[in-house]
Image (tube, grey):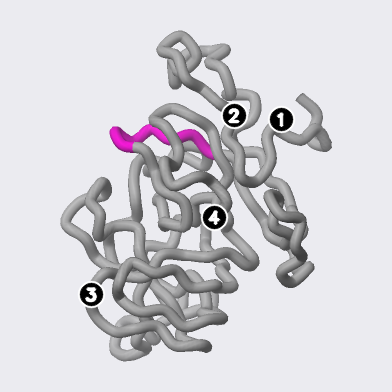
Amino acid sequence: MGLQVDPPFALGQTLGVTTVNDSLVGISGSYGDNWVGAVKEFTDVNPITGKVRSNRRKVCIAVRNTSTVALAPKRVVRLAAGSFTLVDGYASTANAEVVGVVDEYLPASGVAVNDVFWVTVDGPTEVSVALSGTDVAVGDRLGVITAAASTSTTAGRVTTLTLSGASTATVDHTLPVGYIGRACSAGATTGSAVLAIVKTRA
């Protein structure tokens, strides 16, 4: 596959891996292996309605769901250790940074196990707010909230990032540890989502 060839699915879609034979992850020739890891820039336009949201660039990576659950849209997921192409669950630890946000335009049923989908790593996207703690205000810095497990309903959500103590340190001297984005809209801790400009280290 050439570097300029796009994966055959858009935002709001997945590759559509549905059978066991299609999802033999790690075996040479597995369906979708030639697409995972592809990076694509989308324009910030709703693919369902055609409505322009900001016209900013939205950088996404095609990844495979190797967790044990379907992954819901707008939730923050973690890349598996040592992998640039596999997602093994929701982000569930504070300061997690090697993460992406599941395609916000997917249906509520999310991404089936072993299917290939887009995560946003740079640019505008809606992202799910924590179910407890502090409501998110416009302009707040966002980080991943700690959860009991990477498959729980409380995982893969963001909270306001407080810059104090260790969190004020920087990795690349520009972004605080644990920072994954900034809120562009407000959201309550009721399972709502906020529009954010994200910039992760995936």
Badge 3 amino acid: Ser
Query: On residue 104, which mark appears?
Result: 4
**What amino acid is labelled 2 in the image?**
Leu
Please name whichever residue, 62 or 125, is drawn nearer the observer in this view of the structure.
Answer: 125
* Residue beneath disc 2: 15
Distance between the alpha carbons at the discs numbered 1 and 4: 18 Å
Instruction: Tell me the CA gap for discs 2 and 1.
Output: 7 Å
Foreground of the two, 191 or 197:
191
Q: Is residue 43 left or right of residue 73?
A: right
Count residues near mark 4 (Cα–Cα under 10 Å), then give few for <14, some for 14-19, many for 20+: many
Residue 79 can be seen in this image = no
Q: Quadrant of residue 179?
A: bottom left
Quadrant where the N terminus sits is: top right
Separation (CA) of disc 3 from disc 1: 38 Å
- Mark 1 vs mark 4: which is more N-terminal? 1
Outermost residue, front side = 49
**Position of 134 relative to 97 (above/below):** below
Query: Do tag 4 and tag 3 residues touch (Cβ < 8 Å)?
Result: no
